[in-house]
Image (cartoon, rainbow, N blue to C red):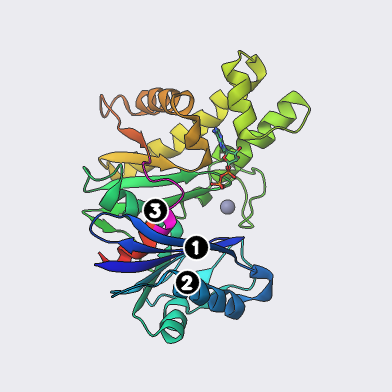
């Protein structure tokens, strides 16, 4: 069985033809989203991208959107794509492509892709986090994505963790992603070093023994651990899978994160399972198509 997965991002639309038995992306295209032209144009472009990769019999189309999506396939809002408020993306794409279409939030779909084809295969219930520019979260409970009552469960990056903290892109203050994302590491690093650096550079400097960079990392990773601890104290799931730019730091990120999280949870458990995501940049396409599995 094959499905089309469409990954809508702030700047790019990626679409692929996916083999649902293996998760393999058989054909693939990437085009600019042209988000400034509004949702109707973006949806026309998504349809064009889908047509480019279409081949043979297709069970359906899946769309991953960079914001919460309700049960009717309506995008409620998007922080990084202008004019998207209550846009019925699944019905609109169904009309354009004349194929059954489902839609969900991109982090939910990445969680689902990791469950079906990646690092989360052994687990029935887990958190998936993408720690990158912001923090996205997908929650799989008993082998199903938990989407919440309205459809916006997993807005975990916007858990308030700092009282009177820094203003977040969502309009609120002191959200988790203001202290624990790649952007936050870059900003804290730039302040500490007095010159512009990004998270990747901070990891490199710390690896070379830079004490200031190491301090910035310790604090940010501690904030990641605090958030994970809050999640686990509520849900006690089997594992946490982490993808996104910051996860590419590898052991320099995961080893201290496991230590710190276990430190906070030690009175409850003697092991925490925190693993890197396995699917690469095609995770969005695979997850969207996997709405049909
Ligand atoms: P994406 O395209 O997924 O948003 P980017 O590569 O643009 O990912 O990076 C997003 C964030 O992740 C940035 O803050 C960046 O500094 C950080 N990042 C990217 N690669 C690494 C790495 N190898 N180690 C640590 N942080 C990284
Ligand atoms: Zn926020």
Magenta-colored segment: predominant secondary structure: loop
Confirm or deny contact between disc 2 and disc 1 (CB under 8 A): yes
| Residue underneath mark 3 | 110
The structure residue drawn at horizontal position 30% and vertical position 55%, both measured from the top left corner, is: 23
- Using the image, determine if residue 6 lies above or below residue 250: below
Q: Which mark is residue 52?
A: 2
The structure residue drawn at horizontal position 29% and vertical position 39%, both measured from the top left corner, is: 239
How packed mark 2 is, by other alpha carbons closer than 10 Å (few <14, some 14-19, many 20 or more), is: some
Ligand 1 closer than 8 Å to label 2 CB: no
Q: Position of residue 205 (x, y in %)?
A: 63, 21
The structure residue drawn at horizontal position 46% and vertical position 49%, both measured from the top left corner, is: 281
Furthest residue in direction right, as rendered: 194
Confirm or deny contact between disc 1 and disc 3 (CB under 8 A): no
How packed mark 3 is, by other alpha carbons closer than 10 Å (few <14, some 14-19, many 20 or more), is: many
Residue 41: image quadrant is bottom right
- Using the image, determine if residue 67 lies above or below residue 158: below
Q: Distance from label 2 to label 1 (Cα)?
A: 7 Å
Q: Earlier in the sequence, mark 2 or mark 3?
A: 2
Which of 220 and 207 lies nearest the eye of the viewer? 207
Q: Foreground mark, 1 or 3?
A: 1
| Residue underneath mark 1 | 29
Q: Earlier in the sequence, mark 1 or mark 3?
A: 1
Q: Secondary structure at mark 2?
A: helix
Q: Secondary structure at mark 1?
A: strand
Q: Which residues are magenta?
A: 277-285
């Amino acid at each position: 069985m094959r499905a089309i997965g469409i990954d809508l991002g702030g700047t790019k639309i990626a679409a692929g033809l996916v083999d649902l038995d293996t998760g393999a992306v058989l054909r693939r295209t990437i085009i600019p989203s042209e988000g400034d032209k509004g949702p109707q144009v973006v949806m026309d472009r998504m349809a064009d991208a889908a047509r480019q990769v279409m081949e043979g019999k297709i069970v359906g189309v899946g769309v991953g959107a960079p914001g919460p999506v309700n049960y009717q396939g309506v995008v409620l809002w998007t922080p990084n794509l202008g004019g998207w408020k209550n846009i019925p993306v699944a019905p609109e794409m169904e009309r354009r492509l004349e194929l059954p279409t489902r839609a969900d939030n991109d982090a939910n779909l990445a969680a689902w892709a990791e469950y079906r084809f990646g690092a989360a295969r052994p687990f029935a219930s887990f958190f998936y986090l993408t720690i990158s520019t912001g923090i996205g979260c997908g929650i799989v409970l008993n082998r199903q994505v938990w989407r919440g009552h309205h459809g916006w469960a997993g807005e975990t990056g916007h858990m308030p963790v700092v009282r009177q903290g820094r203003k977040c892109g969502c309009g609120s203050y002191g959200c988790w992603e203001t202290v624990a994302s790649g952007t936050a590491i870059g900003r804290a690093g730039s302040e500490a070093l007095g010159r512009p650096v990004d998270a990747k550079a901070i990891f490199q400097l710390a690896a070379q023994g830079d004490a200031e960079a190491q301090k910035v990392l310790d604090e940010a990773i501690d904030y990641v651990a605090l958030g994970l601890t809050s999640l686990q104290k509520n849900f006690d799931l089997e594992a946490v899978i982490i993808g996104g730019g910051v996860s590419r730091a590898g052991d320099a990120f995961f080893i201290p994160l496991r230590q710190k999280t276990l430190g906070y949870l030690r009175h409850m458990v003697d092991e925490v399972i925190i693993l890197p995501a396995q699917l690469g940049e095609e995770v969005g396409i695979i997850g969207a198509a996997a709405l049909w599995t």
